[in-house]
Amino acid sequence: MGVGCWRNPLLLLAALVLEARLGHFQRWEGFQEKSMSKTNMNSTLQFFMETYNNASNDTYLFQVDKLLRSQMQLTTGVEYMVTVKISRTKCKRNSTSNSCPIQSKKKLKKSFICDFLVYTVPWMNYYQLWNNSCLEA
């Protein structure tokens, strides 16, 4: 592709449009305080809880008790930086129940505040946990 190809106005216009579109995506700098769509929120939180529960040695399953903060950043997919309060449920690890109430016995109650970073390509149903940390609440 030599210098002569830029003499074609249609090719030049296409190159300018492409540059403008790419420039638009580059303006997303850092995380933005945005709420997730209900679909993305549910699937992202579900992915995080499955990952957390699979890695946990606790006898009981945990679930999201409260969504505290969600931020997003567009990259080649979507990155969500989320803060949640998770609590121990009454369901044990091998439970197949769809409904797991939060533990009410004082001796068994346990909650954490967790920050996690998930990379997702929602239209491909792809999720990857990049980072997470939890502190007892």
Image (spheres, rainbow, N blue to C red):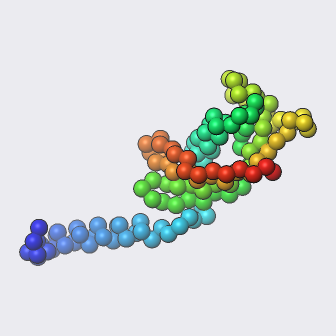
Q: Is residue 118 above or below residue 91?
A: below
Taking the spot 50% from the left edge, 48% from the top edge, the residue there is 120
Q: Residue furthest right?
A: 106
Q: Is residue 78 above or below residue 23?
A: above
In front of the other: 62 or 39: 62
Q: Is residue 125 visible?
A: yes
Taking the spot 78% from the left edge, 34% from the top edge, the residue there is 89
**In the picture, residue 34 is in which quadrant?**
bottom right
Taking the spot 10% from the left edge, 71% from the top edge, the residue there is 2
Left or right position of 31 against 105 = left
Q: Where residue 40 sits: x, y (%)?
A: 56, 47
Left or right position of 135 against 75 = right
User: Where's the N terminus, which quadrant?
Assistant: bottom left
Q: Is residue 49 visible?
A: no
**In the picture, residue 60 is in which quadrant?**
top right
Q: Where residue 129 sits: x, y (%)?
A: 55, 47
Taking the spot 79% from the left edge, 45% from the top edge, the residue there is 111
Left or right position of 31 against 92 = left
Looking at the rendered structure, the number of numbered marks drawn on it comes to 0
Q: Residue furthest front?
A: 57
Q: Where residue 116 sits: x, y (%)?
A: 62, 52
Q: Where residue 65 sits: x, y (%)?
A: 75, 45
